[in-house]
Amino acid sequence: MKTKLTELLNIEYPIIQGAMAWVSEATLVAAVANAGATGVIALGGRDADWTRNEIRACKELTDKPFGVNLMLMAPNKDELVDVIIEEKPAFVTLGAGNPTPYIKPFQEAGIKVIPVVPSLKLAKRIQDAGADAIVVEGMEAGGHIGSQTTMSLMENILPEIDIPVVVAGSIVDGRGLAAALLMGAEGVQMGSRFLLAEECKAHQNMKEAIIKATDTDSVVTGLLSGHGGVRSLRSDFTDRYIAAETDGVTTKEERSKMSQGTNKLAAIDGDVVNGAVQVGQALNRLNAIEPAQAIVHSVINEAIMAIRKAQRFIEVI
Ligand SMILES: Cc1cc2nc3c(=O)[nH]c(=O)nc-3n(C[C@H](O)[C@H](O)[C@H](O)COP(=O)(O)O)c2cc1C
């Protein structure tokens, strides 16, 4: 399947396995890359040594292109930038800060730059600054979210931007990929579906909680914090947090302390009661643990079928 994204990244299928803090590392990323899509190592919470070792480990497991994700609010971002430039993954996705100053240095090192942007205004600015592509992520996504839905982002941004736009947010199967391509996207970024990959090191309890969950089990915490919300499965933690957000007593600092480390608690320690199982809203479709290759291939086959079936709407009578 050829799009501007597959050409830009030299991959077979227009699917990026998005960065997922603590759980998207070499094993998952290489498995997705070997299946013909591409993956992103999440650097959130990681240090320079871990980053260097993980990029090297991934290169041992695949000779296909893969990326890393740098959160620009990370206190150690300068060190991480140096390591990325030295180790040269094929591309970097950038979020949580202004990506503009980093575009040229990465590109000069031969690394493609794909910022995650929340609005048309920023998309245009990032395009003008020379980014290779952008990701737009709707509020249906798992983890930290913006304020627009995937559909409104596609409507608002796709017709206005010339560089490849990758769409994310509750795209979990081939119908979602087909819809995004038909809207004018050049590819999709998927997180939640790859949480259920066999190669993903998310704790079994987290995987089972996701499989058990259905469409109404997702909540957003942190909407009052001013930094955007975080989408996870409803749990004792999210109930406590949302109560604290509305009690008029708990301070922002206290709430920030309450949420610290809760994603790792669920993803690594498997505490899905006191932790945050960050996952998107398309929960009814997340119901099996499969090898990454099976996920990639079924998404592509479903997308081809959906696009073929769509021909019926324009049959000339
Ligand atoms: C558990 C989890 C952790 C995530 N961590 C990050 C991260 O560290 N950096 C980032 O840019 N995006 C992160 N994301 C967003 C994903 O890269 C991706 O854009 C998102 O999952 C897409 O929506 P979906 O979950 O509905 O597929 C995370 C998502 C999840 C589910």
Image: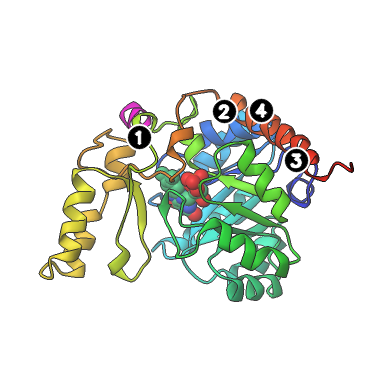
Q: Earlier in the sequence, mark 4 or mark 2?
A: 2
The disc, 3 or 4, on the residue closer to the chain's N-terminal end is 4
Q: Secondary structure at mark 4?
A: helix
Circle 4: residue type: His
Q: Amino acid at mark 2?
A: Ala
Q: From the viewer's perspective, is residue 285 above or below residue 118?
A: above
Q: Is residue 206 magenta?
A: yes
Quadrant housing residue 313: top right
What's the magenta bit mostly, secondary-structure-wise? helix
> Measured from the top left, where is residue 137 in percent x and y?
53, 57
| Crowdedness near tag 4: few (<14), some (14–19) or many (≥20) residues, C-alpha within 10 Å | some
Q: Identify which residue is drawn at 45% across, 27% down.
A: 287
Q: What residue would you read off at disc 4?
A: 297
Q: In front of the other: label 4 or label 2?
A: 4
Q: CA distance from mark 2 to mark 1?
A: 21 Å
Residue at (62, 60) in percent of width and height: 154
Name the residue tied to disc 1: 213
The mark closer to the camera, 2 or 1, is 1
- Residue wearing tag 2: 292
Which stretch did the figure color magenta?
Answer: 203-209
Residue occupied by mark 3: 310
Q: Which x, y percent locates residue 212? A: 35, 29
Q: Please determine whether, in this image, residue 28 is positioned above or below residue 20.
A: above
Instruction: Say if mark 3 contacts mark 1, CB within 8 Å.
Output: no
Q: Earlier in the sequence, mark 2 or mark 3?
A: 2
CB of mark 2 within 8 Å of CB of mark 1? no
The colour scheme used to paint the residues is rainbow
For marks 1 and 4 on the same chain, the one whose residue lies earlier in the sequence:
1
